[in-house]
Amino acid sequence: VAILDKEWQDEVWADCSSADTTALGIALARSFSSSLDAVLKPFHPQEPTRNSSAESEDEDEDALEGMKEATSSAWQQLSQLSQVAQQRLQEVVRLNALGFYTHSEQLCHNSNFLPLTGSGLFALASGFNHSCEPSVQRYSIGDVTAFVTNQKVDAGTELCITYIESELLCAPKSLRSQSLNRDFSCSCRACGRADPVVLGGSRTFIRVDAQVQARLALLPPQERVEAIDAALEGQMDGEEAEEEQLELDEVDGGEDPQGPKTVLLGKDAQELRVVQAIAFMHLCRWEEALQNWRRLAAFTCHHCPPYDEALAVYATQAALCALEMKREDAPLYVNHLGRTTPLACERAHGATASMDSGLSSEVRLAVEAHRMAFGLECLTWRYQREVEESMVSKEVKEAFWSRKPSRSFIRL
């Protein structure tokens, strides 16, 4: 059972935090059948549980009431099911639904692929358990989702995905648990280790969500760069950032918690650096943009699961900036083979000259990251729009594709 977000976004309750699972639950009720009932029998939970995903206190009361009415109306049609059975199925949806997001890692996602975003219950895939060190990652094309191992896995080892954003997996355990918001406490290997840094007491976390990013994007590029520099130092205008007060686990011994009172998580720092890198590209400050993309890629390599999908887009944008820097140093032109190459190289080495090894490494990383996350064959198809909408010149876009290594180039 699946539903696209655009199918319910006009509902009065569309802005509620649990709107996606509510919509999926309504879709399940409307399409319920004996065959679906049989498929869902083994799903967790077997008995209704107390809903731990309580709505936020700042939720709109009219919207919440509309959500309850829509849910009640849909499930009342299933008179053959007891109230307990209906409650269990709604919990099955809440605890087992998976979102699907086409090309979600790409910068052009919202303007091109957002209509393909949705959520669903999968007969097999919804059975994946969570780990803060997942061995499987997933990507979607429409409502078809592929699951790919990101490391070697011994036979007989359980395959796990993450239920939270990969950038949050390096956050303190207490924050991971709050974000998880499920009916279990994670007991994976990562959660069994002590946090390297323990933040106790009350902390104010700067939360960089889609609305904050949109507000920043409205600023002129130079002001955007300056605002983000300040935010990365924990100083952000109240109108540009949302702050969230969280009570964290107290440090051992009951001592006064150490460290800054205002905290910017790695996930939110990543979001800010993406917006800043784009601003640098608007300003044609390619070297600074390149450094931002490299820093984003480095964080992903060190703090996210292996070959996280974001690495492919960061490496691609870094390669485009590096090519733009190269173009400004040595003008590019399309040679007789139809490939864009540096004019200086053409003169020195002939029509088959290639880019220097330093530049090639940027393209190689982009290709290798995509190969591990999504496969090599679909690289051009998946990233055609991403490269097309980049702010680099047409010559650089052509140069990027001409430098893309073939399958035989990469050690498989």
Image: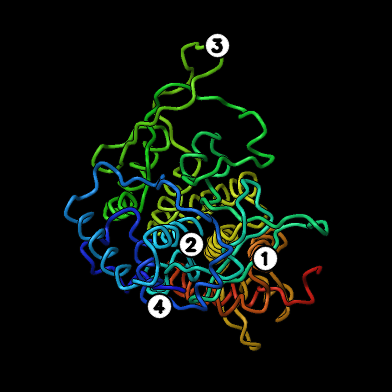
Q: Identify the residue at horizontal 60%, vertical 51% (top origin).
A: 130
x and y percentages locating residue 83 in the rendered image: 36, 60
Of labels 3 and 2, earlier in sequence is: 2
Residue closest to the eye, 280 or 162: 162
x and y percentages locating residue 266 in the rendered image: 50, 41
11 left or right of 132 in image: left
Label 4, label 3: how many angstroms apart (C-alpha)? 55 Å
Q: Identify the residue at horizontal 22%, vertical 62% (top origin).
A: 69
Disc 1 packing (10 Å; few <14; some 14–19; many ≥20) = some
Of labels 1 and 4, earlier in sequence is: 4
Q: Which residue is mark 3?
A: 253
Label 1, label 4: how many angstroms apart (C-alpha)? 30 Å
69 left or right of 329 in image: left
Callouts 3 and 2 close, C-beta under 8 Å: no
Q: Which residue is mark 1?
A: 148
Q: Which residue is mark 2?
A: 97
Of labels 4 and 3, earlier in sequence is: 4
Of labels 1 and 2, earlier in sequence is: 2
7 left or right of 357 in image: left
Model colouring: rainbow
x and y percentages locating residue 233 in the rendered image: 41, 32
Q: The disc labelled 2 sits on which kind of residue?
A: Ala
x and y percentages locating residue 389 in the rendered image: 43, 72
Label 3, label 2: how many angstroms apart (C-alpha)? 40 Å
Most extreme residue toward the left is: 62
Q: Which mark is residue 31?
A: 4
Q: Identify the residue at horizontal 40%, vertical 78% (top origin).
A: 31
Closer to the eye: label 3 or 1: 3
